[in-house]
Image (cartoon, helix red, strand yellow):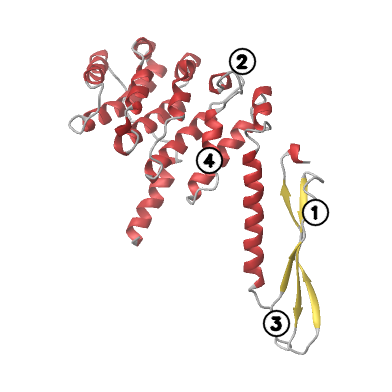
Amino acid sequence: MSVFQDILQKRFWQSLFTPTPGSGRTKFTFEELRALYDVLSKNQVVTEANKALVVETIRSIAEFMIWGDQNEPRIFDFFLENNIMTYLHWVLQQPGNRTGDVAKQVLQTLSIIIQNIRSETGVYFLFSNNHINNIVEIRFDFDDEEVLGYYISFLKTISLRLTTGTVQFFFGNRGEGPVTFPMYTEAVKFAHHKEGMVRAGVRTLTLNVYSVPDPDIQQFVISPSATGYFADMASYISEQIRVGCRLASRTRTASSSDAVHAQPRWAYRPHSLHGTPATPCALSARLHSSSGSEFQATYPPFHIQLPPFFT
């Protein structure tokens, strides 16, 4: 990858997790709104011939919905009456639209709308009828890094709007078997993705989920179907410690009077994982100098904070 391509990629990931400014428009008309809706109505199936038109129309929908929510309730009511969320879900159900421009635009539009809607009615409209859960569970082309980036940004944006009042919309199968929580379970699948911004987005989402004082959330995250995430995190932290130990073992201590030569032997001494919530660990090294003398180097202890139910 060239330096130029690397810069572009970094800008892309940063833009996903930066709030999007408004368009600057101060007035939208019903004539424009009806024209947009007519375009969507006439283009239920997306093809190469109409893809650019559909993408631009979906982009404009976000501006209309946000402006209507904040300035003209009748415009937002128009979207309510005409089930715009149903259309967006329908578009993504078409296999060819789970990658590329259409997928990215739908995910970005939903993220912008969810982030900026202010009215309680608007929030409940977006989250009701299970449309968001259905979109979350769609199998997008995650080999496309841009699609994955928009998807994680979409999930993180939803998590920012979680409250004891809205969380009810994101649980599935209540009273019909094991409870599901797609937003959470789909996100944690990418907890150890190679891209740092993806990992950061997932961790932000999980912290947002844990901060909601809802008994159903608390029960779900410690259920057998969800605790695998914590086991994975423990393994990940353990591996990072091992990497740190290997890097540290390559260091050499030198002094003007007595150079140090031999390989240091590092020891990682974790205390029991079932002890205190903050688990202390220490690194130490036994070093040999060129004169044959031996001394011990001990590094300050550090702590790993474990979830309460691990203690």
- Judged left or right of residue 219, residue 25 is left
The mark closer to the camera, 3 or 2, is 2
Q: Earlier in the sequence, mark 2 or mark 4?
A: 2
Name which residue type carries label 1: His
* CA distance separating discs 4 and 1: 29 Å
Please tell me whether mark 4 sits on a helix, a strand or a loop.
helix
Any mark on residue 175, and which?
2
Please tell me whether mark 1 sits on a helix, a strand or a loop.
loop
Name which residue type carries label 2: Gly
Q: Which residue is mark 1?
A: 271
* CA distance separating discs 1 and 3: 28 Å
Q: Which residue is mark 3?
A: 262
Q: Residue at x 32, y 28 (%)?
A: 94
The residue closer to the viewer here, 140 or 209, is 140
* CA distance separating discs 2 and 1: 41 Å
Q: Position of residue 269 (x, y in %)?
A: 77, 60
Q: Earlier in the sequence, mark 4 or mark 1?
A: 4
- Quarter of image, res 159: top right
* CA distance separating discs 2 and 4: 26 Å
Name which residue type carries label 3: Ala
